[in-house]
Image: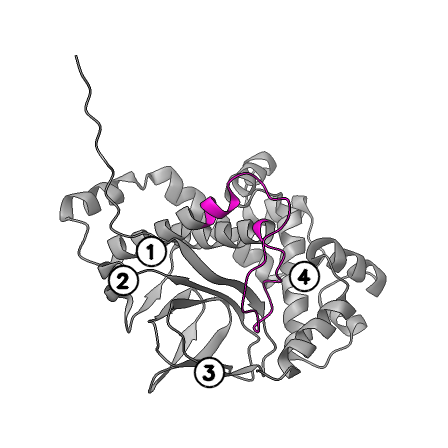
Amino acid sequence: MSYEKITLSQELEIKEIVTVHYFEYRKDFSFPGESHDFWEFLYVDRGEVEVTADKKKFTLKKNQIVFHKPNEFHALNANGVIAPNLVVISFYCHAPCMNFFENKILQINDIERTLLGQIIREAKDAFCSPLDDPHLKKLERNSEVPFGSEQIIKINLEYLLIQLLRRYGKLADASSMSNMKQAKTTKINYDDEIIKRVLDYMEAHIDSRLTMEQICTDQSIGRSQLQNLFQNKFQCGVIEYFSKMKIEAAKQYIRETDLNFTQIAEKLGYSTVHYFSRQFKKISRMTPSEYSSSVKSLSEKPFL
């Protein structure tokens, strides 16, 4: 018996990327705009921004993504109230299906958000260029990287675009969409509801010193069950995730207010400003002062 091989078709392929960015801007940040001969997309991870695309102006909110086609002028401004976190990735792709993304604002779901996170994580390993430098013109490779980092970036970026095309376009037929809905089991929905309830609870108590026991008691859930849910969903424990939420809130205070570090520590329920600083550095890998200086200089640095 002889076997015959087939060559796998590729409706969409990305061989070249230009930039990978994750920005944490101040609330008054402004980018005057540019145009270039490659694709670029902007995703709002936190907050919102005012976007200009050619002659159109619109507000892009959390979990939304917009694509700028080659040679399209685009600019953005923070709204002066909310300090935004943004993902910006630019790349070359000449596949005809990319026309689908022109003039579109799409909503990102959990699968696509995970793909974006994987791209950012791999980019930090693959390149030594800082991901928060808006003036970056060329990515510089790290001398030592985990095996296959650049390929993982390519695969996840292609997967992201295909996922969006399938979900929003007309590429998926009715039966496959039905199968996708059936795949969402009752247990998954139930677990997601628990996680959302706990996240909302922690957000409402961001100024408190929550313990695992208090969370479990107030939410009527077992300790081991909750820990397992967070480990599976976020790859960390409940209190560790709460600490990360506090530091993200601290970053927002630094970027949006004139509060000093002692005041921020008090608002977030830290016993001392020294403990707050240690936690901030442990999670963000820089001190509050270093973070404040970096975002301030980023906002004030003139564009070339």
Snapshot colouring: one colour
At label 3, the amino acid type is Gly
Relative to 297, residue 267 above or below? above
In three-dimensional space, the C-alpha distance between marks 4 and 1, rounded to whole angstroms, equals 31 Å
In this view, the residue in front, 113 or 55, is 55
Reading the image, the residue beneath label 3 is 33
Percent x, y of residue 153: 46, 50
Q: Earlier in the sequence, mark 4 or mark 3?
A: 3
Percent x, y of residue 138: 54, 64
**Label 3 neighbour load within 10 Å: few <14, some 14-19, many 20+:** some
Q: Earlier in the sequence, mark 4 or mark 1?
A: 1
In three-dimensional space, the C-alpha distance between marks 3 and 1, rounded to whole angstroms, equals 24 Å
Viewer-nearest of discs 3 and 1: 3
At label 4, the amino acid type is Ile
Reading the image, the residue beneath label 4 is 247
* Circle 4/circle 3 CB separation < 8 Å: no
259 on left or right of 134: right
In this view, the residue in front, 158 or 281, is 158
Please tell me the numbered disc located at residue 98.
2
Please tell me the numbered disc located at residue 43.
none
Q: Earlier in the sequence, mark 1 or mark 2?
A: 2
Please tell me the numbered disc located at residue 161.
1
